[in-house]
Image (cartoon, rainbow, N blue to C red):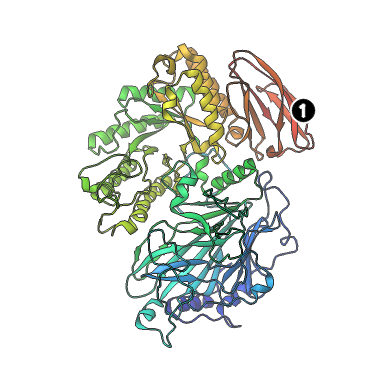
Amino acid sequence: MPRNTSSRIARLALLFAGIPATHGAEAPWRRDRDRLPAPTAAEKQPVREDWLVKTVERKAQVFKGDRDDEIVLSNGLISRTFRLAPNAATVGFDHLVTGESVIRGVKPEAIVEIDGVPYEVGGLKGQPNYAFLRPEWIEQLEADPRAFQFIGFEVGKPKERFPWKRVRHHAPDAKWPPEGAYLRMDYAMPTVSARQLPGGAGLPSDLGRKRLIHDEFETPAEPDAELRARQRIGVSVHYELYDGVPILSKWITVHNGADRTIVVDRFVSEILPAVESESRVEERDVPGMPPNIDVETDYSMGGLSRTNALRFSARWVPDPDYSTQVSYLRQTPCLLEVTPAIGPEQDVKPGETFESYRAFLLPQDSYDRERQGLGLRRMYRTVAPWVTENPLMMHVRYADWDSVKNAIDQCAEVGFEMMILTFGSGFDIEDESPQYMAEMKRYADYARSKGIEIGGYSLLSSRRVEPDSDNCINPKTGEPGGTTHGNCPALAGGWGQDYFRKLYKFFGKTGFMNLEHDGSYPGDLDAASRPPLQKGVEDSQWVQWKIITDFYKWCRGRGVYLNVPDCYYLSGSSKCGMGYREVNWSLPRDEQVIHTRQNIHDGTWEKTPSMGWMFVPLTEYHGGGAAATIEPLHEHLDHYEGMLASNLGAGVQACYRGPRLYDTDETKAAVKKWVDFFKRHREALEGDLIHLRRADGRDVDYWLKVNPRGKEKGLLAVYNPLEREVSKTLRIPLYYTGLTDAARVSERDGQAKEYRLARDYTIQLPVTVPAGGLAWCVIE
């Protein structure tokens, strides 16, 4: 909906001039509310299609609410209802499909600490019981005059967080930015002041900082000079709800309209009093189960799994207002706080705006592990669609011209799409001499002429640089070391700034299209002052995260593919480790192939197949000798094919690390056979993996790949680790293929046979799998 010019001017005047907000009939936001559409009778009904199987046609919109002081953000799957007077607050957050409320109470929309003073943003007070929220209680809630006051809103469409240059179209239906509805709600500085006292509830205090207090404030007759200076500061809370998925994004901005620099010390961008998943009287040192809501942020780092990487940006904590909870010590983890673990302590100059990171909420509709994983994977495809890029890649052991040229030629011959000058190859991305840059451009030009993208490896964290002062200084010791990977260069220091200058220059001049960035910044604190970028420990994590993610976003805008062993997916990375122990690649070959399928099975509960890499050591890796090594390739062709079939049969790419992909015509034909198989069925293979039987070396193991929106709805891969042929009938669940009545199944692209689905969407499928081999069936 276009903004009305007069109401926009009125809102900005309120926002930046410190005029008290009004909620009467003439409030500017009421005119905007009246222009919103009212939901039709159909739009008031929940979506009936299963969003994980069918395309949901209902669009996300901002509607008029049932009252003249309410608006609703809804897409038929979930909705968030806002009461706008006497202050704005979320008074409803509902999972429309299950009919359940996501929340059990009203909280502020955000909290910000500015120049050492914490403020709530919006919210209503007076709820008598936080176990549930009765509609009649909402009528009695009151605004807190000490909080930022709602003054207006604007609606529109989501905008891209950063550019994504699409050069790999593996998911042609991926959209950027996601389609949906956008809502911005504006708040003005309160006209009363507050003083800080120890204790109370509000801003997190992990590092011993001040906390917000709710019950003791100074309210002078006239604002003092300091308060008047701050009244030109505005806070906006932003929401996006996407079409066809129950995913809501939220973040805040702080605009400094004052005539001096302010400091955003801390913030909490989401405070969600969610319905608890369980009621425990006692804790007994066993952590409680959080609510059934998946949370992701783009401030994730320092972990190969999302739960580890999320620790810096979001957490489930006890709700101090929930006095009637079953937990005797009131320790139920049912309050979501989206807040940095430290900082950000960012200076905001006059006329500038501070923007927080973004949180993405996915209220789940089931406790079924497979269904929850499917929802999470769909969230990544929606809010970070570059994770669908899934090129076949080789890791080349040597960086001299002859080795690289031979590897490029082999990649082109068998259908690989990308190659990386791997660690230990001699490639040096930090060499910016004209001769080296020209040589690397020659590599890239030749690769491009063969239809191959070329990239390279660089190590950041887990190295110690010179001078020693350019390493992160451990706040506990005052010395370098003791960080996540032992050592980490300080990104705001002289070495760190020069390092990133070299990376920008290298990718800007050579035509390389991939970076494997090992030991990416893992969130280490840095106690040093590094002007002009960093003041000290309190802002060090924010500053370094910003430096590295700005670079990743720049890469994504140029189409540069990012392999990063860390959860930087929402900041531009496409792939992280699927989950494996490196030294396991020194095990005997027949054990490696079982580990491969176990790792894929375990790694794809939360990752799409394209989000994780596996490993195929063509030459010796971490020892193990001849029993662990594939080279010479033609002498171990059965194992080589088994590794190709295990990875590509799951739609997963591996680091095929060695000097060559084939050594004989027979080996070349085998590699090309599996690459052709993958590309022929790519639509299904790059879909979700349904976990059926995990590999254990005792019997056949199998999984089902599904893509309900594709022509090929599924592909069943059945592996036989035994030394004898196995024949059996398998019960295959086809619900997530989208098929309802009948399925056409063809084995190895042969003649299709029709099967009727049982009431539980399963078929009984007879299969015969050769010893040590793979049987696969396409399902349409």
x, y (%) of residue 584? 44, 26
Q: Which residue, as the protein is rendered here, is positioned at the far left? A: 467
Q: Is residue 176 left or right of residue 558?
A: right
Q: Quadrant of residue 776?
A: top right
Which residue does the image show at 58% across and 50% down from the upper left?
289
The residue lying toward the viewer, choosing from 140 and 659, is 140
In the rendered picture of this protein, how many numbered marks are placed on residues? 1
Q: Say if residue 671 shows up in the picture.
A: no
Q: Residue at x 55, y 77 (%)?
A: 143
In the rendered view, would you say 219 is above or below 607?
below
Q: Is residue 285 above or below residue 200?
A: above
State whether residue 445 is above or below residue 508.
above
Residue type highlighted by circle 1: Glu
Point out the image quarter for the N terminus. Answer: bottom right
Q: For the view shown, which residue lies furthest in the top direction?
A: 635
SS label for mark 1: strand
Q: Is residue 636 visible?
A: yes
139 sits to left or right of 268: right
Q: Position of residue 399 (x, y in %)?
A: 31, 27
Is the residue marked by circle 1 packed among few (<14), some (14-19), or many (20+) residues within 10 Å? Answer: few
Q: Is 673 placed left or right of 139 in the picture?
A: left
Q: Is residue 91 left or right of residue 554?
A: right
Q: Residue 48 at x, y = what percent? A: 73, 52
Residue assigned mark 1: 754
Residue 480 is situated, as x and y percent measured from the top left of the image, at: 26, 46
Of 438 and 608, the residue lying toward us: 608
